[in-house]
Image (tube, rainbow, N blue to C red):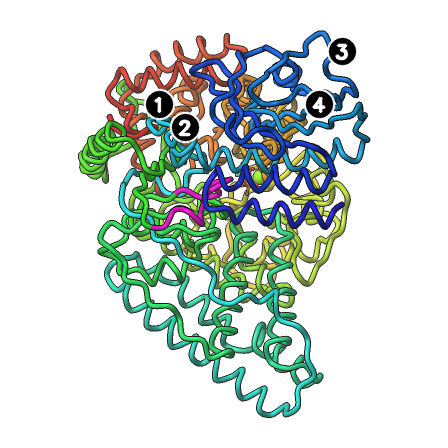
Amino acid sequence: MLETLHSIVQEVNSATDLQTALETIVRRVKQAIGTDACSVYLTDFKRRTHVLRATEGLRQAAVGKVELPLHRGLIGLVCERAEPINVDDAPAHPRYLFLGETGETVYHGFLGVPIIQNRKVLGVLVVRQSEPRQFDDNEVTFLFTLAAQLAGAITHAQASGSLWEDEGREKKTSKSYLQGSPGTSGVSHGVAVVVYPMADLDAIPDKPADDLAAEEEALLAAVANVRKDLERLESRFEGLLPSEDKALFQAWLLMLEGDSLVNPILEHIRGGNWAPGALHHVIEEHARVFDGMEDSYLRERSSDVRDLGRRILMHLQKDTPVVIDYPDHTILVSEEVSAVQLAEVPPEKLAGVVSASGSSASHVAILARGMGIPAVMGVVGLPVGRMDGMEVIVDGYMGRVFVSPSQAMAEEYQRLEQEDEDLSAELDSLRGLPAETTDGIQVPIYLNTGLVSEMSSFGTTESEGVGLYRTELPFMGRDRFPGENSQSENYRSILSAFAPRTVTLRTLDIGGDKPLPYFPVNESNPFLGWRGVRISLDHPEIFLTQVKAMLRAAVGLNNMQIMLPMISRVTEVDELKLLIQRAYDELSDDGYAVTMPRIGVMVEVPAAVYQAEELARRVDFLSVGSNDLTQYLLAVDRNNPRVAEIFDDMHPAVLRAISHIVEGAAVYNRPVGVCGELAGNPLATPLLIGMGVDNLSMSASSLLKVKWVVRSFSRTRAKQLLQAALRMEEAEPVRKLMASTLDDMGLGGLVHPGR
Ligand code: PEP
Ligand code: MG
């Protein structure tokens, strides 16, 4: 059964339009289940009817004609209950409705399963049998699985407006869009150009090599060609991207340099495998290490590794890449747009990016941000195969993609595009101005860094320092822990880039599912396991090396603070402070002119919220890690797309927790910052100011937006809004309140398209 299911699903997915998909399903299901008839009814919500859309067994002439009013018949019952209805003698059922036009008088056995997408019943998949027949459990689950596939195809059709238009019914395009996640804010419209991955690494088998030397030579030649491609593409971005973002190309070139990627492939070849097989193994091994990482940025690196692998394979197979003639206003669309595919589009022709997979941490999103190109990532159900040449609107604020939009929608978005341009000119005028409320309270805005993308020259000049430097990155992509000297050099470069402004270095925050390749941790519950300072305390030698590197890096600059992540017990702080003191003493004894830095803790687990006061007594500052705090307060995995909708850092429980932290810290007069994503969300800015949060730390792209909000509110007004928000019981009304407040003040453009 599983094989049949696979093959039906494949055939349905390759259908070019909804009708073909429906016809495929009814034909194949009838055959697979060995039944007399199989049909699909879809619900037309406007007309409040269930319409027969495809059948194999009932009269073909009835397709599109037979309509059942909502809630009528067994079909209506399946929709109402959103459950399968399985009856061996349908005419005997009280809800049975006789429909002569379908020729169904003779059918007794009935099994109907609902077609559900996003909790909404879209229609029913039905099989019928002339004789009485009770369908068995296997048949029910089989239909269920197929119905789920059908739901995806219907959503595709809705997005491209083809669901009802073929019958002259009202076109549904005006409000239909596909939802993804925002990659780069901004809106644009243009023509979809669909690109496909070049060569399929997964299809490569192992094969004994006849001539090892020839295989090695072929591999090195392919790698050299990929290098040339990358260098050519890099030169395209001269003057277009901040040099820091362009460093991505250097990172890829470095990967091709030898030690980590090429040498292991050569070793595999020497073990007897042919070059493509060896390449496949090594690329998969590398990509899998990244796949398992918690940090979304690092997890996304696996797609870079696979992309490089495909490029090498393409040259190994001596395939010439397809040359695409990109039209003006190209919207680049793919199952997984790679950064290099983006680089292949002449920059002046690129208007937007839409990718079925990936997130805002993908390199392609980072490049798009650097170029100011709107991008939507992770669009579930993107009908990639049908989009080429279609008109598309990309809404990077809301993460929406409109395929074949109605004229009214296209006009609306043109207006929004114009307003966006005006807005960014206005934001630019805020550069260099202080982040100060209208009643004169300073709310310093810091930068979150640690990743290439965040080290833009704009972020460096525009921020008042670094509120969170994630030190994990220099520890990744290596084969052992970095030594004190190399760490120190790294920290020194960031400290001197910002001096005399403060830089907050966070100590290593690795964990069970953010493993270092050379320090594997396997746990069934990694978020509640060995992570952050728990590892530091169990391995003081790692912590001491890092702290010494930090202290040495700050000599003469004295602009560093140290921050401890994932604190859940006060004794952790006591013990880590002793270790920091020890590092300081040892360095002083060795003659270094080190100074004792300010020490702070991150408040990101509920225990720390309720001990904010006790923590504040022990340290110089607190910083709220709202990402983890939300995850632990709401018990929602921050990286799990299935529960992404209920991960909400504006949940009243999160807001109350932050208020509680501020009150606790106030007892000892300690400043509180926020450095999770919430800090960079203009909707939350007035609430955080109202709570008395002292500073905010965020990625470069949010700096000016948040500054604008800070400069538009008084603390008094912010407090009033906070009071109102804290009375709310759900996140949604809080968001609505804040969005309408910003709208009323002419700041709506910061959180949605248009002004
Ligand atoms: C947080 O948890 O909010 C935070 C800033 O730390 P990270 O995202 O690195 O876990
Ligand atoms: Mg965290």
**Circle 1/circle 4 CB separation < 8 Å:** no
In primary-sequence order, the first of circles 1 and 3 is: 3
Labels 3 and 4 touching (C-beta < 8 A): no
Relative to residue 96, is residue 627 drawn left or right?
left
Residue located beneath label 3 in the image: 92
Q: Are marks 1 and 3 in contact (CB under 8 Å)?
A: no
Which label sits in the foreground, 1 or 3?
Answer: 3
Marks 1 and 4 sit apart, C-alpha to C-alpha, by 33 Å
Are the residues tagged 3 and 2 within 8 Å (C-beta)? no
* Callout in the foreground (2, 4): 4
The residue lying toward the viewer, choosing from 260 and 33, is 33
Query: Which type of secondary structure does the marked residue at label 2 adopt?
Result: helix
The residues tagged by marks 3 and 4 sit, at their Cα atoms, a distance apart of 11 Å
Q: Nearer the viewer, residue 347 or 124?
A: 124
Name the residue beneath numbered marker 2.
164
Q: Residue 365: x and y, percent?
A: 40, 49
List the residue tagged with mark 4.
107
Q: Amino acid at mark 1?
A: Glu
Assess whether mark 1 and mark 2 are in contact (beta carbons under 8 angstroms). Answer: yes
Going from the N terminus, do you reach mark 3 or mark 4 first?
3
Q: CA distance from mark 2 to mark 4?
A: 29 Å
- Classify mark 4: helix, strand or loop: loop
Q: Position of residue 488 (x, y in %)?
A: 51, 61
- Camera-side mark, 1 or 4: 4
Q: Quadrant of residue 497?
A: bottom left
Q: Which stretch did the figure color magenta?
A: 376-388
Looking at marks 2 and 4 on the same chain, the residue that comes earlier in the sequence is marked by 4
Residue beneath the point at 50% across and 74% down:
312
Q: Compared with residue 484, is residue 538 higher up or lower down, i.e. above or below?
A: above
Image coordinates of residue 152 in percent, x first then y, are 54, 36
Q: Examine the structure image and report whether residue 217 is included in the region drawn in magenta.
A: no
Q: Which mark is residue 170?
A: 1
